């Protein structure tokens, strides 16, 4: 890709299917891009699609990004519309404005933003990621009682790389109580727990309650690094 943010249509046109590019241009000309702003090397905005709520779009270098529309791949027509709108409006880089704030101005801005519920949730996740993750686990368990929980589980998977061992352990224990098959979610959660230095006794306890093959394999993988401890656990009073 030639440059990003783009300077002209030629910088991004070849990365889009022809139909997505054509419809994105039409969306931009129709005024469907409600907001577009730049933060460093990323463009963000809202594009009005077929649903009442506008789709949120984020595009970065190499046309990596995301859109919450149902289109199965990225970049989509909404991303194309955002790029066309950027070329037309050329908004100021928000990051430069933020970097120019004094410490007092930045603190005042954060305090004002914290009064907005949506922003307050994001600030909480950034300032206290462990607490925010555990709150997500509590929401997951609540969703289980209503027969759901898969969307909450997917959201926690996205935050998994920032979670600590205790938080991952809580997520793992909750998953095993799911009203749906937790199998597809266990793999990444177990890998993260192992990377954080998982405990053999914890795996054995879970396996005795929920004999999933993935749990047994995780116990064996960890037991290979501490065979004497694993054998002592297996030879203990536990059935």
Image: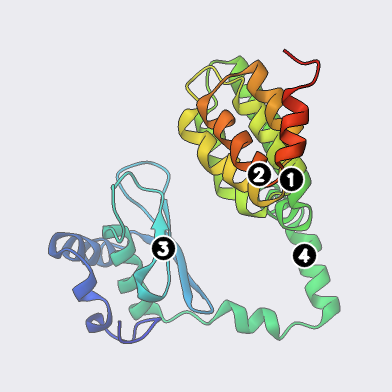
**Foreground residue, 37 or 126?**
126
The total of numbered circles placed on residues is 4
Q: Secondary structure at mark 1?
A: helix
Q: Earlier in the sequence, mark 1 or mark 4?
A: 4
Residues at marks 2 and 4, CA–CA distance in whole angstroms: 34 Å
Asked whether the residues under the numbered discs 1 and 2 touch, taking CB atoms below 8 Å apart as contact, a structural biologist would say yes
- Circle nearer the N terminus (4, 3): 3
83 in relation to 10, above or below = above
Identify residue for label 1.
165
Query: Upstream in the sequence, badge 2 or badge 4?
Result: 4
Circle 3: element type: strand
Between the residue at mark 4 and the residue at mark 3, the CA separation in whole angstroms equals 26 Å
Residues under labels 1 and 2: Cα distance? Answer: 6 Å
Residue 139 lies in quadrant: top right
Residue annotated with mark 3: 65
Q: Quadrant of the N terminus?
A: bottom left
Res. 193 mark: 2
Please name the residue shown 70% across and 48% down the image. 121
Residue 119 position, x and y percent, is: 68, 54
In the image, 165 versus 114, the foreground residue is: 165
Q: Pointer 2 and pointer 3: residues touching (CB < 8 Å)?
A: no
* 110 to 232, vertically: above or below: below
Quadrant of the snapshot with the C terminus: top right
Query: Which element carries disc 4, helix, strand or loop?
Result: helix
At label 4, counting other C-alpha atoms closer than 10 Å, the crowd grade (few under 14, some 14-19, many 20 or more) is few
Identify the residue under disc 4.
110
Tell me the residue at 83%/70% (across/down).
107
Residue 173 shown left or right of residue 156 in the figure: right
| Residue that sits furthest to the top in the current view | 239
């Amino acid at each position: 890709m030639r440059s990003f943010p783009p300077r002209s249509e030629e910088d991004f046109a070849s990365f889009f299917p022809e139909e997505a590019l054509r419809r994105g241009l039409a969306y931009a000309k129709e005024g469907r891009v409600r907001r577009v702003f730049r933060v460093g090397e990323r463009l963000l905005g809202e594009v009005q699609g077929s649903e009442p709520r506008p789709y949120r779009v984020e595009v970065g270098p190499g046309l990596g990004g995301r859109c919450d529309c149902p289109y199965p791949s990225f970049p989509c027509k909404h991303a194309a519309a955002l790029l066309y709108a950027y070329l037309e409006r050329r908004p100021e880089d928000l990051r430069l404005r933020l970097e120019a704030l004094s410490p007092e101005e930045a603190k005042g801005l954060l305090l004002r933003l914290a009064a907005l519920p949506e922003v307050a949730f994001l600030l909480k996740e950034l300032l206290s990621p462990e607490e925010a993750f555990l709150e997500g686990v509590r929401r997951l368990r609540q969703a289980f009682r209503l027969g759901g929980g898969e969307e909450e589980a997917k959201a926690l998977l996205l935050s998994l790389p920032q979670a600590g061992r205790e938080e991952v352990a809580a997520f793992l224990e909750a998953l095993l109580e799911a009203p749906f098959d937790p199998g597809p979610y266990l793999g990444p959660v177990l890998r993260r727990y192992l990377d954080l230095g998982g405990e053999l006794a914890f795996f054995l306890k879970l396996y005795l309650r929920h004999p999933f093959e993935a749990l047994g394999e995780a116990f064996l993988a960890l037991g290979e690094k501490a065979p004497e401890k694993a054998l002592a656990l297996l030879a203990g009073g536990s059935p």
